[in-house]
Image (cartoon, helix red, strand yellow):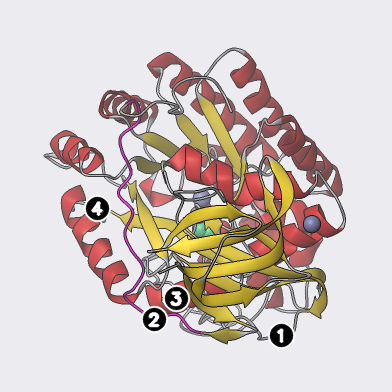
Amino acid sequence: MGYDLIIRGGHVITASGQFHADIAVSQGRIAAIGQTLGDAIDVVDAGGLIITPGGVDPHCHIEQVSGMGLMNADTFETATRSAAMGGTTSVISFAAQAKGQRLSEAAADYAARAKRGAAIDHAFHLIIADATVPNLEADLRELIAAGHRSLKIFTTYNIGLGNAEILRVLHIAREAGALTCIHAENDAIIAAARDRLLSEGRTRPIDHAASRPRSAEIEAVARMCRLAEDARAPVMIFHVSTTEAAAEIRAARARGAPVWAETCPHYLFQTEDILDKPGIEGAKWMCSPPQRTTRDQDALWHALALGDLQLVSSDHAPYRFDETGKLSNGADAPFPAIANGMPGLELRQPLMFDAMVKKGRLGPEAFVALTATLPARLYGFARKGDIAPGMDADLVLWDPGREVTYGANDLHDNVGYNPCEGVTVRGWPVRTILRGRTIMQDGTYLGEPGTGAWIPRPAIGTRPADITGAHT
Ligand code: DUC
Ligand code: ZN
Ligand code: ZN
Ligand code: ZN
């Protein structure tokens, strides 16, 4: 009799509006939303709290080997624990092909890692690091048909693809129905800048910023927009950091190019001077592209407001500040020998909630759209990212009055430092619910490794309202 769970008296925010209502859950799904819903086995009092859909973080590196051959500090167990603590209930991480490896093997390998450890729901972008392997096309078609609807390619690092290879991938992706995500920075511009800096003896973490000139991003983003347009294949430009790259994306979309794009909290909240710390300390914030300027921050917010950029992902790339991670090449390593990336899975939702819901930048509905609804729609999570009957009961309860200042090591990942130490956020996730089950309550983790589900995603074009139609 009755429902499994009723959450009473919360203030619900979705991408399309806000309302006061009770939410009833049965068998992991939202069964009803209304005022007098009847009985339930469990009742949660959400009086005074805000309820949003669980966060969908569509770009994070988990239990993955970096281009430098370094293993991430986080396993699926620790990364998804951290995500849950910060109000995120689904992630898309990567199944990374090694050079010479069959894509199907990489996919199976990462699926096994997630099956063992993940406590929240998940999917993979298939990284194509070697387009020369036999069976690439056959494997891609089979994997996409089996529910992997997104790929990832690079224009730089030691796994960058050339234009001809990128076009080939885009053609296959278009035919098979996958979205191709791209790390877009011009490799030659970066190599030249790096070599010049090193020849001048500029080797510190702050010099990493100058080693990845904005022109590298601008050129590659503009080129990828043109390739996508030519191939008529949808692409997602990852981690946009500059005013000019956002403008290129706006112009491409205005031409009707099938281009989508994301940015990340570190580009919205940090500037490159964060790398300028004594010794090698700045390595903690080193990422690629690097943080830019306050002018870029304003432009990125503006691009989010205009819909030129549609998503905010964490780009969680966890490495410890010790010899297993950032300092694997010594405590005086030059910047090219330091792993890129920082933790962010647990930070993304509270940072964005503070900025958008509490401080009002773009507003509460946009917070939900950018961090849950649009990632779910663009990447094909049919039952995630919204609060409506039939959807998975992935919910976050927020205490809008709670103020928290981050400490040095208070995240629940395995990284050991918090890149937002000293930052204060207002509004705090006090309960995270995954398919009707509470996995975090009042700072206590209640998730279980291996209980997260892999979410197969239908190929693009196999479902109405797919992204090949109108721009969002
Ligand atoms: N940049 C990347 O391209 N990947 C992971 C982390 C980073 O900073
Ligand atoms: Zn209300
Ligand atoms: Zn990247
Ligand atoms: Zn990344």
Nearer the observer: mark 2 or 3; the answer is: 2
374 and 164: which is toward the camera: 374
Residue type, numbered disc 3:
Asp
117 and 382: which is toward the camera: 382
From the image, tell me which residue sits under label 1. Answer: 408
Disc 2 is placed on an element classified as loop
Answer few, some or many: residues within 10 Å of disc 2's Cα (few below 14, many 20 plus, some between 14 and 19).
some
Residue type, numbered disc 2:
Glu
Disc sitting over residue 99 in the figure? 4
Query: Which comes sooner in the sequence, label 3 or label 4?
Result: 3
Rendered residue at 17%/42% (across/down): 133
Query: Which comes sooner in the sequence, label 4 or label 2?
Result: 4
Disc sitting over residue 448 in the figure? 2
From the image, tell me which residue sits under label 3. Answer: 74
Residue type, numbered disc 1:
Ala
Residue 145 falls within the magenta-colored stretch: no
Label 4 and label 2: CA atoms lie apart by 33 Å
Disc 1 is placed on an element classified as loop
Query: Which comes sooner in the sequence, label 1 or label 4?
Result: 4
Nearer the observer: mark 2 or 1; the answer is: 2
Q: Tell me if 360 is positioned left or right of 344 in this view.
A: right
For the residues bearing labels 1 and 4, Cβ distance under 8 angstroms:
no
Which span is picked out in magenta? 446-461
Nearer the observer: mark 4 or 2; the answer is: 2
Quadrant holding the C terminus = top right
Quadrant holding the N terminus = bottom left
Answer few, some or many: residues within 10 Å of disc 1's Cα (few below 14, many 20 plus, some between 14 and 19).
few
Disc 4 is placed on an element classified as loop
Measuring from the top left, give residue 168's x and y in whole percent: 29, 26
